Amino acid sequence: MIYFCQTMKKMLITGATNGIGAAAIRQLKDTEVHPILLARSEKKAQEILREIGRGDYYVCDLSDTMSVLQAAQEIISKETTIDYFIANAGVIGYKDTRKTGEGVEMTMQVNFLSHALLVEQLLPVFEKSGTVLAFTSSMLHRSYWLANYDFSTSLNATKHSQFKSYSRSKAAICTYAMWLAKNEKIRVHLLDPGVAATGITRSREDWMDKAMNSVGFLFSKPESSARTILRLIQDEKYKRLSGIYLTKNRDKSPDKRAMETTNQRSLLDQIKKHLPAV
């Protein structure tokens, strides 16, 4: 632990060593928020926490189910209260089809399933704390061509298609968040930071990564996109309400398919199937 004051609010966050998450951590420097990073790179976690002069971190690789479970158990043993949980980490596909040992497409694992596993493991802490949970989404969850709400097939590793795996992971995130929002002991929201130059395609290391980097000047800066996280933290209404889809400037609702009970139940069945520890 670098520094902690009893009046500070604890914020557990994934994807905070790069892009939007890192920008949000830096912008929270002068607030009473104590960041707790879940990061694959211990070195990067230490570097960003040194910048703001406080915080904690746990090593967690979202592509590895056992790493997620281990991190969750460490958190349970050390953290009695968590005020915010920000599920921010994500990748836009890989240049080849990759899957976990459980047969899950890797983008779905990193963007969605590992976050769902964290929530399921930490839910008793969240419920006791009255935690505000927020999942980073994307406008692509609304696409009728890319986003697939048939979760009996979308979680499985299939032939890779450019943005489909990413869009389907965001559809799963939105659906899961809307189901969680029914839990009256917590508050659950979705964050849409817009298209930002974050390096999210770096996992591909191919033409798409180069193309995205070459037109990055057309996208929002991470500092601007981090505004969604700041809005969530700074506005008290998000502690009272649940199920809101936040953009940088306004509140919306997610795609209606994410709010359909049949889709939510189908997704929960797949979570249990692919994550037997839940």
Image: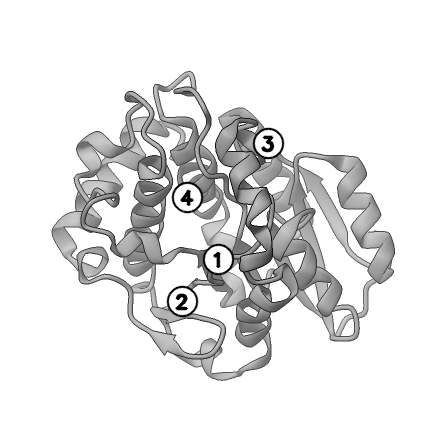
Q: CA distance from mark 1 to mark 2?
A: 32 Å
Name the residue tied to disc 4: 116
Name the residue tied to disc 3: 61
Tell me if label 1 and label 3 are in contact, CB under 8 Å.
Answer: no
Horizontal and vertical percent for residue 56?
76, 51
Q: CA distance from mark 4 to mark 3?
A: 14 Å
Task: State the residue in front, 211 or 129.
Answer: 211
Name the residue tied to disc 2: 185
Horizontal and vertical percent for residue 76?
60, 45
Name the residue tied to disc 1: 195
Whichever of callouts 4 and 2 sits on the residue coming sooner in the sequence is 4
Tell me if label 4 and label 1 are in contact, CB under 8 Å.
Answer: no
Residue type at the position of mark 3:
Asp
Residue type at the position of mark 4:
Ala
Up-down: is 124 above or below 27? above
Whichever of callouts 4 and 1 sits on the residue coming sooner in the sequence is 4
Whichever of callouts 1 and 3 sits on the residue coming sooner in the sequence is 3
Whichever of callouts 1 and 2 sits on the residue coming sooner in the sequence is 2
